Image (cartoon, rainbow, N blue to C red):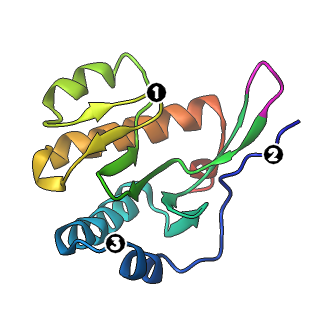
Amino acid sequence: MAKNKTGETQVDVTEFINSYVENEQKKADSFQLIELMRKWSGFEPKMWGPTIIGFGSYHYRYASGHEGDAPMIGFSPRKAEFSLYVYSPTEENKPLLEDLGKFKIGKACIYIKKLADINIDTLEKLCTTTIAYLNEHHECACREK
């Protein structure tokens, strides 16, 4: 069985942002996202793989037998745009997307250019409902809180 490539690492989050993120606005947005996601999740930021900043963790297991661990919520300050890992496709979350602002969505993440493009209150609701969904459906670090 294939091993999940994106595991938690010991890389310092602040050092990662200061060395990886070149754009000053993206750097400021990264530090703001850290503060917001820390508050919303109750967890300290940790690096997952080379570029994902995650908060908390959960264990998933698919019907195929593939399983692994992933951050409950997180983001990556990629060169072109932020990848936000905050969305579970629940009935409660779908209408929230209408109020989020300017974004694109992929299979597993929401892409934004900058924080000013989105509604932070809606982002908070997406994060907290996703954490609740993970708590209900997976082995989740949020149960320990």
**Dot label at residue 21:** 3
CA distance for labels 3 and 1:
24 Å
Give the residue displayed 30% in from the left and 62% down from the top: 33
Which residue is under mark 1? 107
Find numbered disc 2 in the image and state the secondary structure of the residue it sits on: loop
Q: Nearer the viewer, mark 3 or mark 1?
A: 3
Q: Earlier in the sequence, mark 3 or mark 1?
A: 3
| Badge 2: residue crowd in 10 Å (few <14, some 14–19, many ≥20) | few
Give the residue displayed 14% in from the left and 44% down from the top: 119
Q: Which residues are magenta?
A: 62-66
**Given the current orientation, which residue lies at the most extreme right position?**
1
**Dot label at residue 129:** none
**Could you say which is closer to the camera, residue 45 or residue 116?**
116
Q: Which amino acid lies under the numbered mark 2 shown in the image of this protein? A: Lys
Give the residue displayed 74% in from the left and 25% down from the top: 62
CA distance for labels 2 and 3:
28 Å
Q: Which amino acid lies under the numbered mark 1 shown in the image of this protein? A: Lys
